[in-house]
Image (tube, coloured by chain):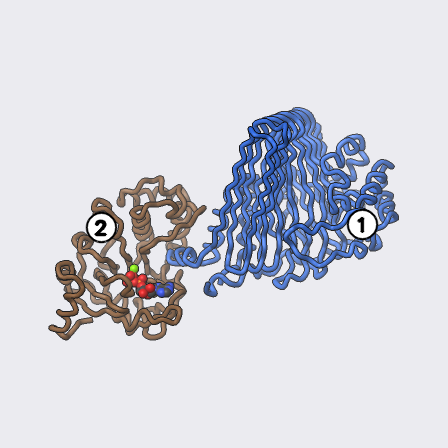
Chain colours: A blue, B brown
């Protein structure tokens, strides 16, 4: 292969800067004392401290997983600071009072927050370095009884709801990183849609890691009561640092009878430079429980950032006729590594799941799809369709597919399709012969490849995702 | 064989090109004036497609000697997309499939890119849709083609028509048709020929690479060239193609010996 396909994604990271907001940082290291400090700082009830300590005890007995197809140097959990909060200058009643430095940060990120909130009708719960700084549109949501706030606030104002659901989908000892998160999570989002309410707008959260060396342990809990529906958007960017940053979030979704939760993510954290220096470790546990009959959990993700991504947004289809969906685009380049996929656990009768995974590898990157479809003995007439497509840009990258299919009920119908394609020189020449340069060609091919997933994204996000992929692939072909 | 417009469009001099250290083109000379149609014939493997791809700037081939003048420009100095923008069009012998990219989207991007480089207005999706449907009528193409992925699952003949459709959209100065007739039934051939004839005028020129006289019945060439082993070994008028059809390429060797002199 000639030079045309070399030289992947060597764009400098556009979002690489540190915002100078005064931070309050906990001393490095993890022990019971740290956990008590976090809990005290956040003025938490006793049961939550117990939850954290229980998780910590579990975590101590666990070891880091090593089955995933990624490689990284060992994380020193004692060199991480587990708490960092920006000091708000005063109580914030409106967006105008938000720290201008923070607003400038969003400006640089290309996220004009007012506009986004006002024009697009999106409520933005801004999680900035683990602590919510501003929440908008709360009143509008409150009118229909929706609670959308930081999880810290929810702990103070709606402790009974948090207590009832926290850790019910991802138990404290679920896995090493989930246990860690449960012990030390500092903030995140909470969303509660009451019975019969269709959320009138997409709920959106922008996460951003800011303090160098501080781990990020976001916790998100979304509950849709009977007949409720919500579309939740999560978008991420991070500044450029030389030390790897660990991000170990936990997201739990719960859908009751006839409820519908759609969770969309566009992830663009710092991936490290072209030599693999720096970059975020993104080890996330995301799981949705389709608890009620006819409930639906739908995950859509566009993963373009992080040095290492390790995540499997999953669905537990417990309710009869419940539906689980997973639509994913994972783009890796340079030395990025991604091991991502989903788990569909069919428990209820007539449960259905769809998996559409699109992996794009460029540069020297490696991307793996890992998916589990399990049909349990009582899941009569369960159906699954999986499609895993990989696209290689250049010839130094790799794509791998690991489907695990466990069928314990004969009535099940499980289909799996996979393909690997390559952006070839002859395709690029065909475009060139029609006047189109290779960057535009690659972006068109890649966006075409991802179409089925992008169609699942809310309009605004779809546009953003398309731009993001093009941006990420700029300079990928010479 | 009267030149319809004396201004030279393409002038190829002593063109040599390699791929993977093997010389494939071994000194090609060819002059094409505006308004002319040139046919290039020759056995499989004689270098016809390579010549076409070198004109279009395919990165697999390295030009080791010679030069190519396209109007006032040094064609070899331009990357392939700029050659296309300048008006060089290649209808591929084997058009490649591009899964996932809608034909309509691809055609519009190509059209708008070329138009804007030429200082013309671009068309929005609705305007373009009208425009492209009009062109498709000429080629008797089903509008369904617009919604399908570029060339994906197209039959051989459909791919060739899609190539000519692109030529109709991009209005090149030089259209190079590499075996566009192969794989077409006689009806499709007539439609394609009609399309090509419709596109020709005094400002452009066409190079037809073909094995068969039947295409030349419909698109009548001003010159016929025969390639062999990377060179043009004989040039004549349209009657040369008829002779070749009658006697085969071997005849040429005997004939060549007899006549000794070969025009270029
Ligand atoms: N990319 C390539 N790599 C190696 N050999 C090639 C390549 N392209 C063409 N050739 C060789 O060059 C010669 C001419 O091929 P081609 O131009 O396709 O001939 P034609 O179109 O006249 O049939 C053939 O021997 C072919 O095998
Ligand atoms: Mg050929």
Question: Do marks 2 and 1 share a chain?
Answer: no
Q: Which mark is residue B140?
A: none
The image position of residue A401, as x and y in percent, is 56, 48
Residue closest to the far left? B258
Circle 1 marks a residue in which chain? A
**Observer able to see residue B5:** yes
Name the secondary structure under disc 2: helix
Q: Nearer the viewer, residue A435 or A64?
A: A64
**Observer able to see residue A118:** no
Q: Which residue is mark 1?
A: A83
Q: Nearer the viewer, residue A63 or A99?
A: A63
Name the secondary structure under disc 1: loop
User: Which residue is found at the position 61% from the left and 62% from the top?
Assistant: A274
Q: Is residue B108 left or right of residue A159?
A: left
Q: Is residue A440 left or right of residue B170?
A: right
User: Which residue is found at the position 65% from the left and 59% from the top?
Assistant: A272
The image position of residue A214, as x and y in percent, is 76, 53
The image position of residue B226, as x and y in percent, is 21, 65
Q: Quadrant of residue B9 in the image?
A: bottom left
Q: Around disc 1, counting alpha carbons within 10 Å, would you say few (fewer than 14), some (14 to 19), or many (20 or more)? A: many
Q: Quadrant of residue A204 in the image?
A: top right
Q: Nearer the viewer, residue A409 or B74?
A: A409
Alpha carbon of mark 2 to alpha carbon of mark 1: how far?
A: 74 Å
User: Which residue is found at the position 52% from the left and 40% from the top?
Assistant: A416
The image position of residue A364, as x and y in percent, is 57, 60
Q: Which residue is mark 2?
A: B193
Q: Quadrant of residue A164 in the image?
A: top right
Q: Is residue A118 left or right of residue A29?
A: left
């Amino acid at each position: 292969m000639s030079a045309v396909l070399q030289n992947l994604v060597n764009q400098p990271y556009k979002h690489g800067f540190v915002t100078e907001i005064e931070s309050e940082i906990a001393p490095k290291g993890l022990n019971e004392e740290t956990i008590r400090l976090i809990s005290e700082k956040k003025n938490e009830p006793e049961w939550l401290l117990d939850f954290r300590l229980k998780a910590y005890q579990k975590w101590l007995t666990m070891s880091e997983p090593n089955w995933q197809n990624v490689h990284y140097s060992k994380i020193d959990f004692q060199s991480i600071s587990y708490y960092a909060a920006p000091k708000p200058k005063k109580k914030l009643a409106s967006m105008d009072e938000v720290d201008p430095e923070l607003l400038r940060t969003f400006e640089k990120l290309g996220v004009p927050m007012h506009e986004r909130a006002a024009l697009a009708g999106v409520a933005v719960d801004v999680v900035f370095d683990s602590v919510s700084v501003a929440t908008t549109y709360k009143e509008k949501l409150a009118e229909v009884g929706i609670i959308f706030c930081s999880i810290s606030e929810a702990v103070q104002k709606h402790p009974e709801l948090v207590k009832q659901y926290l850790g019910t989908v991802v138990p404290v000892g679920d896995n090493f990183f989930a246990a860690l998160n449960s012990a030390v999570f500092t903030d995140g989002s909470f969303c509660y849609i009451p019975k019969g309410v269709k959320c009138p707008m997409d709920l959106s959260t922008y996460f951003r890691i800011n303090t160098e060396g501080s781990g990020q342990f976001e916790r998100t809990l979304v509950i849709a009561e009977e007949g409720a529906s919500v579309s939740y958007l999560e978008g991420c960017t991070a500044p450029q640092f030389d030390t790897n940053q660990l991000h170990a979030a936990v997201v739990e979704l719960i859908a009751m009878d006839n409820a519908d939760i759609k969770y969309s993510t566009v992830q663009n954290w710092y991936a490290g430079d072209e030599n693999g220096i720096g970059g975020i470790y993104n080890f996330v546990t995301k799981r949705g429980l389709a608890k009620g009959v006819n409930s639906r959990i739908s995950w859509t993700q566009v993963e373009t950032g992080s040095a290492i991504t390790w995540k499997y947004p999953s669905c537990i289809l417990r309710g009869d006729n419940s539906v689980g969906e997973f639509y994913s685009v994972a783009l890796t380049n340079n030395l990025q590594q991604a091991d991502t996929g989903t788990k569909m656990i069919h428990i209820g009768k007539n449960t259905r799941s769809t998996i559409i995974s699109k992996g794009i590898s460029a540069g020297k990157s490696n991307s793996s799809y890992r998916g589990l479809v399990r049909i349990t003995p009582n899941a009569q007439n369960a159906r699954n369709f999986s499609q895993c497509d990989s696209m290689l840009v250049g010839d130094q990258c790799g794509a791998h597919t690991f489907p695990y299919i466990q069928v314990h009920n004969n009535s099940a119908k499980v289909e799996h399709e996979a393909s690997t394609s390559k952006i070839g020189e002859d395709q690029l020449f065909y475009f060139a012969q029609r006047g189109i340069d290779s960057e535009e060609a690659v972006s068109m091919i890649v966006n075409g490849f991802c179409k089925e997933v992008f169609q699942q994204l809310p309009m605004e996000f779809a546009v953003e995702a398309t731009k993001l992929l093009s941006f990420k692939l700029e300079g990928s072909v010479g | 064989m009267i030149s319809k417009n004396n201004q030279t469009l393409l002038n190829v001099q002593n063109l040599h090109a390699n791929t993977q250290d093997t010389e494939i083109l071994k000194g090609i000379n060819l002059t094409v004036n505006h308004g002319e149609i040139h046919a290039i014939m020759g056995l499989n493997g004689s270098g016809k497609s390579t010549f076409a791809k070198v004109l279009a700037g395919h990165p697999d081939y390295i030009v080791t000697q010679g030069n190519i003048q396209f109007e006032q420009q040094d064609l070899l100095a331009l990357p392939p997309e700029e050659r296309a923008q300048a008006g060089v069009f290649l209808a591929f012998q084997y058009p490649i499939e591009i899964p996932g990219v809608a034909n309509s989207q691809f055609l519009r991007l190509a059209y708008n890119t070329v138009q804007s480089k030429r200082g013309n207005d671009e068309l929005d999706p609705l305007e373009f849709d009208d425009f492209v449907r009009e062109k498709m009528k000429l080629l008797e193409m089903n509008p369904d083609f617009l919604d399908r992925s570029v060339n994906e699952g197209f039959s051989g003949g459909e791919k060739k028509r899609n190539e000519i459709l692109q030529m109709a959209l991009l209005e090149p100065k030089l259209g190079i048709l590499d075996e566009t007739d192969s794989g077409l039934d006689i009806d499709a051939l007539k439609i394609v020929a009609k399309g090509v004839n419709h596109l020709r005028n005094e400002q452009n020129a066409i190079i037809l690479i073909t094995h068969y006289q039947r295409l030349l019945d419909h698109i009548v060439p001003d010159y016929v060239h025969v390639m062999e082993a990377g060179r043009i070994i004989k040039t004549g008028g349209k009657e040369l193609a008829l002779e070749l059809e009658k006697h085969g390429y071997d005849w040429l060797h005997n004939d060549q010996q007899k006549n000794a002199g070969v025009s270029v």
